Image: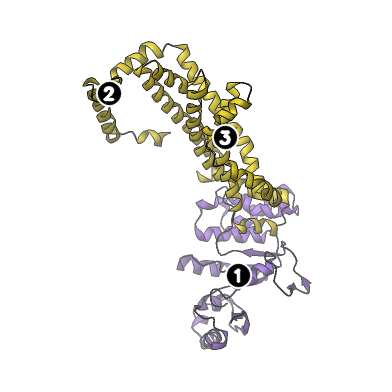
Chain colours: A purple, B yellow
Amino acid sequence: MGPSGCGKTTLACMLAGYVAPDAGTLAIDGRPITAAGPDRLMVFQETALWHWMTVLDNVMFGPRAAGTLRGGEARRKALELLERFGLGEFKDRYPNQLSGGMRRRVELAQALINNPRLMILDEPFRGLDVMTRGLMQEYYLKLFAESRMTTLFISSELEETLVMGERVLVMGGAPARIARSIDVRLPFPRTPQVLASERYLETKRELMAALYSPGHRIEGGSA
Amino acid sequence: MKRLFRRLDWRGAVSIAAFVILWTLLARLKAPGFAEIPDPAAVGRAFWQKYLPSAAYWNSWVVSFERVTYGFLLAQLFGIPLGLLLGTRKLFNEVVFPLVELLRPIPPLAWVPLSILFWPTSELSIVFITFIGPFFIIVINVHDAVRGIRKEHLWLARSLGASRETIFRRIILPSVIPAIAVGMTLGIAVAWNVVIAAEMIASDAGLGRLTWEGYVSHTGTTVIIGMISIGLAGYLSTLIVAWAERRMMPWQR
């Protein structure tokens, strides 16, 4: 997490292989990133679902385009995922006909069908109403608990960070850098009791201190 | 279709009725400027007696519709691929776009003399002029649409391992369909504009010619029947285009 404008999205786009760094290299597990690939998938701030394709076509796109699954196989797996995401009956709808939270679930299905090794979520729940947002957070955590897939979750909100995160990298400064790494030593699931515990407050204080420490602040930025 | 007719409820009928009454009064009283303008009843009579049973009159419809159809369809046929090439191929764009920008501001009717000189028949020259109008509109619309495709839409496809061909067919092409629809709506209107003027200048048939002949022979009823026919023909084409557009974009239903 970090103040808006500090370069979180840019860094994410570099990891995904959409944007090349001006200098230096990026590597995942020692392998340099040279292009976009289905091993690292990103869920964008604004929905990137193709609004001219039905929900099912959106989800099937990856395995079909890459040729990893045969047509019928891709369809079966997509339907299975949609069913699991509670979207089975919406498979023939177009994205514009879905609510914000449902669209997010479709995007997750669209990514997960490709078995990525890294999921990059760029403030995925921003713009959702408070209730939907809470449900989506819970939902993703459950999903994550099942798959244990590495997730880079970008957020600009303290509470969200503490609900979702295991390890928080605080970005800031100009030029931006990773200012601090904070381990969130809170058990999952993060129940209301956990989120009221002494350790939660401690971590929150630590995180706030990192965000607001003068050296890492961006002039005019907001936390 | 239903929506288009619903607008003609009684409130709309008020202004139309007022218009007809005012027109009748002014024509009957021979108000200044109305010396040669017949009243609505005379127009109705002339239509009923002279034009409705006339094969020549209906042939004018057919001729104009044919010209608009050819000009419009050719404009789509050449304009859409050109717009796509301009939007997707950098080198092609750098070479060709300046020429497009040079020719685009020339109004279609300014092409009339050159077109008559160039094409062997007046029919071909009129179709060509009718083509020019919608052609540049569709080229520019598609070109802008390709450039305006959200980068996330392309990124996502690349991430998922789509080939260039798949990206073109399943992402770029559907992305520009709304722009093609806009180009069609504007294009059909321009095609009618242009064909009428071209017919008045350079043809011996069609609704534009019919109207012009009414003027030349001082027949007010013919002029007005021509105008109304042109309006109806344009409206009819708009309905057909609107129907085609809805078919093209099932996701907007």
Q: Chain of mark 1?
A: A
Q: Which residue is mark 2?
A: B34
Residue neighbourhood size for the residue with mark 2, other residues' Cα within 10 Å, grouped as few (<14), some (14–19), many (≥20): some
At 56% across and 78% down in the image, what residue appears? A2
In the displayed structure image, the side of residue B35 where residue B111 appears, left or right:
right
Residue neighbourhood size for the residue with mark 3, other residues' Cα within 10 Å, grouped as few (<14), some (14–19), many (≥20): many
Mark 3 belongs to which amino acid?
Ile
Confirm whether residue A56 shows in the render.
yes
Please give the label number shown on residue B132.
3
At 53% across and 58% down in the image, what residue appears? A102
Q: Chain of mark 3?
A: B
Q: In the image, is residue B164 above or below residue B60?
A: below
Element under disc 2:
loop
Tag 1 and tag 3 share a subunit: no
Q: In the image, is residue B142 above or below residue A18?
A: above
Q: In front here: A27 or B202?
A: B202
Mark 1 belongs to which amino acid?
Thr
In the displayed structure image, the side of residue B105 where residue B235 appears, left or right:
left
Nearer to us of marks 1 and 3 is 3
Distance between mark 3 and mark 2 Cα atoms: 36 Å
In x, y percent, where is residue B23?
26, 26
In x, y percent, where is residue A205?
52, 87
Q: In the image, is residue A171 above or below residue A96?
A: below
Q: Which residue is mark 1?
A: A9
